[in-house]
Image (cartoon, helix red, strand yellow):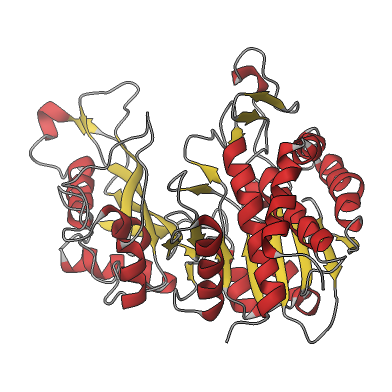
Amino acid sequence: MTGSRAGAIARAQREYDDGVFVDRLAKLVAVPTESHPPEHKADLERYCHAVLGPMVRELGFETVVLDNPEPIHGPVLVATRIEDPALPTVLFYGHGDVVRAMPERWRTGLDPWTLKIEGDRIYGRGTVDNKGQHLLGIDAMGAVMAERGGRLGFNTKIMVETGEEAGSPGLLEFVRRHKDLLAADVFIALDGPRVSRTVPDVTLGTRGGIAMDIVVDLREGGHHSGHWGGLLKDAGVILSHAIASIISRDGRILVPGWTPKNVPDSVTRAARAVQAEVLPGAPVPEPDWGEPGLNNAERIYAWSSAIVLASISGQPESPVNAVGGKARARIQLRHTVDVKAEDVVPALEAHLAAQGFDEVKVVPVTERDAFQASRTDPDDPWVKAVVSSFAETSGGAPNIIPNIGASGPSEYFRQTLGTPVIWIPHSYGGCGQHGPDEHGLGTLFRDGLGLMAGLWWDIGEKGRPA
C-alpha cells in the first residue's frame, strides 16, 4: 500500500484547482435531465448510459442500468467495485435528475444547461442538486485510488436514481427488488445544503411529512347573511376555531400524539451543538414562535412542526353576503421518528372529538406516497467514524444533524438494507436549488473533495468501525 492520507486529500483538491472536476461537472450539467417523464426519459437514460456511466467505469466499476419498477420514470444506475468480500462495503447514493430548468427566469447571461463560473460561484442546473455532489464523492474515490496504487481499501456500490425530484417513484420497490445487489455496511449520500459554510455537516435522517384536510361540510350553498347570519353555523368560523385548537397562537402544537414524548439524549446533545450561519437575505427565526424551551436547531431537528398549507371558505375571489356551509384547510405535520406516522390522523380525529368539533372531518391526503421519518443514532459507530474523519481533516468538530427538517427516502434504505444512513451536504443555503440561477461554491466543492478523500481513505485504512 502506497501514499498517505494527506496525499489523497491533496490529489482530490488538485482535481478542482486544475479544472478537471469542473470540466467533468460541465458534461453532467449539459444533459437536460428534468424529472418530468416521459418527455425527458431519453435524457435520463443517456445520463446513466453515456455520461456518468463511463466516468465510474474508468475507476474499475462494473455498471448496470436497471429499469424503474414504474416504467414511465427514469432508470437507476448501479456501479459495483468489489476488492475483497471481507472488506466493508459502502453504498454511495445520488440522483441524476433535476427540477424544471425554467430558463426564462435565469439571469441574463446564464443558461441552465451551460456551466458558467463567476468568481466563486459555479452556475448550472444540477450543480448542487445533485450532479455536483455525487461527482464530488466519485472524484474523491478516484483520488484515493490513485494515491493507494489503484485500491480504495473497501468495496463500493454507487447508486444513482433519476426520479428523486419527482418524489422517488418506484424507489422503495427498487430497493426491495435489488436488496442483494445493494447490500452494504453503510449508506452514504451527498445532498442538500450545509447549515454553515465554514463547518461540515453530518446529517442522519429526515423528518416525515404528512398532510391531511380538515373539512367542515354543513349544508349545500350559502344563505343570505342578513336573514340567516347569527342563526346558522358559519363553516369558516368553525374551521378557524378547529385550526386554533390544533396550533396555538404562538405556533405550539396542541394535538396529543403529534410531538415526541421523549427525545433521545444523543439527539438533544447533537441538536444543541449545531453551529448555524445566518445567511444574508434569509428569514430570521421568530424567537417567540414554536415549542418553548427549545432552541432553533431542536425545533427543526428534534421536534415536530405543523403549518396550514391552504384554507378556504366562501368565495375569496368574489365574496358574497352569505353564510357559508362549507370550509376546508390542509394541515401539514413534519415529525421525527419519535412520532409514528400511522398515529397522526387518528390522533387528530380524537383531538377534534375531545374539543367538541363534531362537524369537522379529517381526510388523509393520499395523492402520493409520503416519505417516512428516519434517523440514524448519533452514537452509531459509523457516525462516529465519519465525525472523527471530518474533524481530522477540517481541524474542528462537524455539525451532527439528527435529521433535517424536510423529508426524503432515507428510511427506504435504512429499513430495507439494515444500514445506518448518513447524508453529507456540500452546498449552502443561498445556492438557488429548485429555483433560477442554481449554483455551487467552488470553495465548498474544493473543501468537500478534501473531506470525502479523507473519509474514503480512513474507511480503507481502518475498516469497519467497532
Give coordinates of residue 245: x percent, y percent.
18, 56
Q: Quadrant of the N terminus?
A: bottom right
Looking at the rendering, which quadrant does residue 149 occupy? Answer: bottom right
Residue visible at 69% across and 60% down in the picture: 93
Q: Residue at x 70, y 55 (%)?
A: 137
Front residue of 155 and 282: 155
Q: Position of residue 76 (x, y in %)?
A: 80, 58
Residue 348 in the figure: left or right of residue 76: left
User: From what the image shows, is residue 281 above or below residue 433?
Assistant: above
The answer to whether residue 263 is above or below residue 334 is: below
Q: Position of residue 312 (x, y in %)?
A: 32, 37
- On screen, residue 454 versus residue 374, left or right, reads right
Q: Residue at x 59, y 74 (%)?
A: 414
Outermost top residue: 108
Which one is in front, 81 or 375? 81
Residue drawn at 56 percent across, 76 percent down: 382
Which quarter of the figure is the C terminus placed in? bottom right
